[in-house]
């Protein structure tokens, strides 16, 4: 089991460019999440998908879009990158195999927008 | 609204106990979690506690929950240099709300 995988690991964009961050999980989890991590602010939820075919906004959705392509994959798109989107992005998934609903995290994508 | 607060830094000597504290606001949380993040890596679940428990022990880790004061703590006994990391508490009133993280530095 690879768990949660993310690509790319690093990315540098110019202001106004677009890109898609990819995430996949092989644990048959229903729910998937995108967070951003900024110094001193913990993790903030951008979007989540409680199940295949559904997506909902989290705490900081502006400037992002998501697609739950199938049960395994959940992508995050930046249509027009801004320097304020420089951050580390984490994808996570959770299931109901254990009642604690613990989330499993990917290794992160470090994005710099210049 | 929902909020989780942690102190940002803790420094201890190797072999001492570490206590990381967290306060939360949502009394409907069913589970509370402690995650560990090592440098350059994602978060890994360390332990969790169900809201009807006061204490949970797991090897060197002890979690204490005071529901009346909405206070959660993580005690690491015999702290080692490998425990140096950022520790996040999180609550779940539906979807995870994370604290800012406490950076634990263990000095030899």
Image (cartoon, helix red, strand yellow):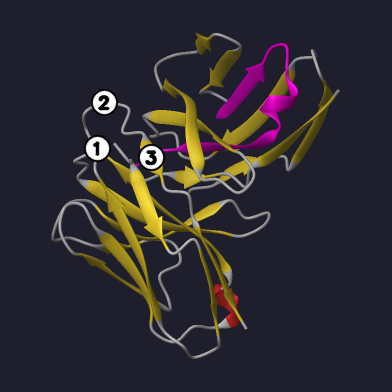
Which residue is depicted at the point 41% across and 84% down?
Answer: A18
**x, y percentage for residue A85?**
54, 74
User: Judging from the image, what secondary structure is the residue with disc 3 in?
Assistant: strand
**Mark 3 → mark 2, Cα distance in angstroms:** 12 Å
**B77 or B74: nearer the viewer:** B77
Residue B87 in which image quadrant: top right
Q: Which chain letter matches label 3?
A: A
**x, y percentage for residue B53?**
43, 14
Residue B82 in which image quadrant: top right
The magenta region covers B70-93
Which residue is depicted at the point 24% across and 37% down?
Answer: A95
Q: Which chain letter matches label 2?
A: A
Q: Which residue is identified by label 3?
A: A104
Q: Which residue is identified by label 1?
A: A95
Would you say residue A106 sits in the magenta stretch?
Answer: no
Whether tag 1 and tag 2 are in contact, CB under 8 A, the answer is yes
Q: Which residue is identified by label 2?
A: A98
User: Judging from the image, what secondary structure is the residue with disc 2 in?
Assistant: loop
Which residue is depicted at the point 71% across and 22% down?
Answer: B19
């Amino acid at each position: 089991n690879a768990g949660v995988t993310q690509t790319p690991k690093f990315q540098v964009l110019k202001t106004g460019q677009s890109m898609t961050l990819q995430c996949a999980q092989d644990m048959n989890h229903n729910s998937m999440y995108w967070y951003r991590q900024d110094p001193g602010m913990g993790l903030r939820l951008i979007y989540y998908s409680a199940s295949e075919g559904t997506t909902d906004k989290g705490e900081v959705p502006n400037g992002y879009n998501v697609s739950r392509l199938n049960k395994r994959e959940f992508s995050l798109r930046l249509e027009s990158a801004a320097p304020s989107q420089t951050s580390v992005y984490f994808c996570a998934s959770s299931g109901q195999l254990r009642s604690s609903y613990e989330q499993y995290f990917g290794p992160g994508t470090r994005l710099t927008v210049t | 609204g929902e909020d989780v607060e942690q102190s940002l830094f803790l420094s201890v000597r190797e072999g001492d106990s570490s206590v990381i504290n967290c306060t939360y606001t949502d009394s409907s949380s069913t589970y509370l979690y402690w995650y560990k993040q090592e440098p350059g890596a994602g978060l890994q679940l360390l332990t969790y506690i169900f809201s009807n428990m006061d204490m949970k022990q797991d090897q060197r880790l002890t979690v204490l929950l005071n529901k009346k004061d909405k206070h959660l703590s993580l005690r690491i006994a015999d702290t080692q240099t490998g425990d140096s990391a950022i520790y996040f508490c999180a609550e779940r009133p539906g979807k995870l709300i994370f604290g800012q993280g406490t950076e634990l530095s263990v000095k030899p």
